[in-house]
Image (cartoon, helix red, strand yellow):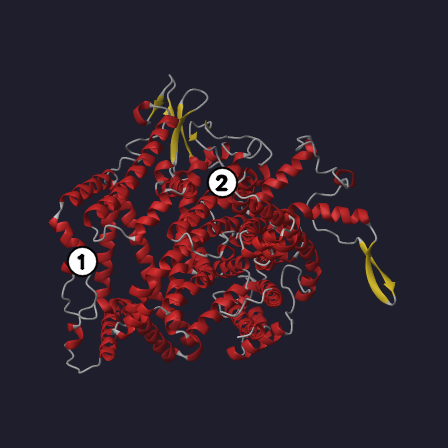
Amino acid sequence: MSRWEYFVKRLLLTVPVLFSVLTFLFIMLRTGPIDPVAARLGPQAGAADRAQLRERLGLNDPLWEQYVDFITDFITFNFGQSWVVQAERDILDIAVGAAPATLWLGFWAILLPLFIGIPLGFYAGLNPNTLGDYAASLGGIIWQALPNFWLCVIALAVLRRTREGGELLGINWYTLGPDFAARDISITGTPRLEWFSTTDILMFPVPYISDWTALAIDIKLILPPALILGSASMAAELRIGRTAMLETVNSKFVETAKAKGLSSRVIVWKHIFRNALIPLLPVITSEAFLLIGGSVIVEQIFNINGLGRIFFQALTQGDLPMAGALLFLFTVIILGLNILQDFLYTVIDPRVGYNQ
Amino acid sequence: MSTRQRDSTDEFEEPDDDTLSRDRIRENPRPAMVWLGGLAVLLLLEIGRVFAGVGQLFGIVGFTVELLASVPTSVGGNVGGTLGSAAGFVATAITAILMAFAITVPVAGSVPDGAVDVLGLDLSRRGHRWAKRAELTFVLVALAGLIAYTPFGGVFSALIGAITGGVDALASSLPAITSRDLIPNTGHRLPEGGWEGTFLGLSPAVAWAIRTGLVFAYATAFLAWMWRGFDVYRTHYRLADWTPRDDTVRRFRNNYWGLFGFAIVFVFVVLALWAPAVSPVEAQHNIYEPNAHEFEYLSDDGEVTSTTHVFANLQSRSDGQNTIGPMSYDDYGRWAPLGTTNRGQDMMTHLSHGARTSLVIGVTAIGLGALIAVVLSLLSSYYKGITDIATVMASDTIQAVPALLLIMLVSVVFQEADHPIAQPLDGGLLLALIFAFAYWPGMWRSIRGPSLQVSEQEWVDAAKSYGQTPLQTMRKHMAPYIAGYILIYGSLLIGGVIISTAALTFLGLGINPPTPEWGRLIDGGQSYVSTDSWHVATIPGVAIVLVVIAFNALGDAIRDAIDPEADVDESEAAATGGGA
């Protein structure tokens, strides 16, 4: 099987997967143990109200008709309105409104581990069995086992404490960089993301950064949660980066390069570094799973009004259709990322797919 | 070897290993007897707890059976609701028959063939097998019908009730060396100094330390005796002088990182199993029903007075303003080795019972998930084709949804509806089932490669042509090669389950009070981290980190021990709990 055939096969397989996810959601939300009418109206509602809502939600239709309606609505992103969380607002609107904060968080949560985890892993792999290697590896093991929610609690406590004089390494988090204390803003909260404007260059709107202070505030706001959200991936990148580096260093072509008389700097950067990146690709793309799952916890604790927090609110306030819709959106994102990963792999590493 | 091979009457059955080692024990019974005698002494020392454990096991089995028994009627009820009662009855019957059949398939092999010969039919071997299953199904369904629809059922349940009642009575009356009755640590100060009601009049702290020390000493002795049992078996009763497993054990024993992990896991398991013994106050008094239980203490004006736990708890909260820190007494003379929680409960009691909750959930979830993964991987690699594609589809579907969010949604749906399955452990069982549902695809995917490889081996072909049934081929010739892999992934994933459970409870979506859970402790203490009551959120957090590191280390060590060359993909099994 050629690699492109393999890619197309994977692509086609996502269609039935999407449908079975929808079917699962339908079973959970409509025919599951919970009655949608009771969930919406509460136990005290009168029989007339119940009957009316039952009719309005289409629960009196035959099951197959409900199923077809459900699938068509979800496929066309017509999720209807939120019940409780932001009542009567379109669910898609709410999601679009909350997405930028989550994207901003996710961007930094991917970027930070990339620039900390991979260099550390490569360093450990280049200097195996040294003190630095042990320190990096042990740090990675502990970092991976730290629960995000506990890290959030501890980090917030430490950062808050820096304000009352209990400074950490002489740093007061509130006055470091953009001064939060003087502006009277909390160190938790939703980034406003209003630091860019657009200007027209040759009729096209091009964004540029108009307010550097606002950008700095947003970055400072997002750094601690992003670092915590990326912690697990950072540890994974460190471990796998180390293994990949070790394997590449000991491979034949590096020996050849040495025999050719290349300088060790050229060997490391040109031959080792690029090849060691290949096994890291799935780690980086699979971070999306961790980010989406973890965003619920981190956003909830750091008061960021992103997708994860809205999902959590929908669940705790009994807004199940909205929770289902958001879960479907997350699934679509993940399926898209999977396809992207397969595509990148097909382009970068021709070995994939041959022996499947 | 050749002398040991016996002429088997059944050409399709391999000589049974059990009878062989039984013969060897008969030839040289002394070492086995010594070991069994030691084991009996160890068990007798803790006989009360052994029976308590048996009683709990009965409870679990009873609950499972009841739950399974309610499936046919609930399916019938659902169908009957839409299609009429006749269809409902048919659906009930069909579900019951299908379930009975599913139970018979794995056990039919061990039923003597004579059961089918009675029918006097001339059957092919395959027909013979199916006839046996059908017969067993019929017997099962008839029995179930007898119990469900005739007075015989009443007698049956009375019998079960008598047995469980007897076990419970034994559990509470038999002694144990680690019981609270033998070494009590709850008492009150006397006005003239000293303590009343504690072990030998020692202070509660010392009495508690003695009891906890005894628990760990006993558990270590038990572990050492088990190891000795393996040694005895190896030197006296095993056929071969050497097996690959010896190398596995040797590699594991020389892996210090793995031994560190094993030690922490051991402490965690002991904490969970002996939770009632290592907790300074009884959980029933302090956490579950604090207003129904009174205790005595020496009040400030020098009199011994009595109060309820709920009142005393209110006064000994660690909530920033006042703190009962680790290694201290509260104002009521109750010893708190790890301090109190933000609601005034004893932290050590909460922590050890929380360990129990985590362990039960982790083991149930991973055990069930691994079972599903192994069965499906055997089926899909043996039959290939449509079975394989269907499994790929199912696992792709579950893996496409972010696991933590899926678990949250399903858990909320069942808990909102107050489904009976959400009752045990205040949602703990429900969580374990959802984890199993969400995690089996990962495990299946990681053992898929090895099981496909095994299914291509020549010995599997040989077994097929030799006339072994598919079930036997899978069980005897394929499963042993996959067991190692599933062990590795299981121990790597269990840390993820523990983190996720704590995270969900922290968010208020997992296990509801009063069942103790570590995540709720962190939730309760999160506002006080930078105050004097720092210990409330810190101690359970450190405990989670240690346990998860330990399980990861154990998994890594098992992997290295089983096959140092094994190419196990780490990214698949990264025990991070889906970002929790």
The first of marks 2 and 1 along the sequence is 1
Q: Is residue A6 above or below residue A179?
A: below
Q: Quadrant of residue B466?
A: bottom left
Rate crowding at label 1 as few (under 14), some (14 to 19) or many (20 or more) other CA atoms within 10 Å.
few
Residue at x-position 37% and y-position 16%: B192
> Could you tell me which quadrant the N terminus of chain B lies in?
bottom left
Taking the view exactly as shown, the residue that stands out farthest to the front is A260
Write down the residue under mark 1.
B1
Position of residue B383 measured from the top left corner of the image (x, y, whole percent): 37, 74
Q: Label 1 sits on what residue type?
A: Met
The quarter of the picture where residue B440 lies is bottom left
Q: Residue at x 46, y 63 (%)?
A: B445
- Real-space Cα separation, disc 2 to disc 1, in angstroms: 55 Å
Q: Where does label 2 land, which residue? A: B540
The crowd level at tag 2 (other Cα within 10 Å; few <14, some 14-19, many 20+) is many
Tell me, yes or no, whether dots 2 and 1 are on the same chain.
Answer: yes
Placement of B115 over or under B500, stated as above or below: below
Residue beneath the point at 53% across and 37% down: B538
Report the side of A324 relative to B98 (left or right).
right
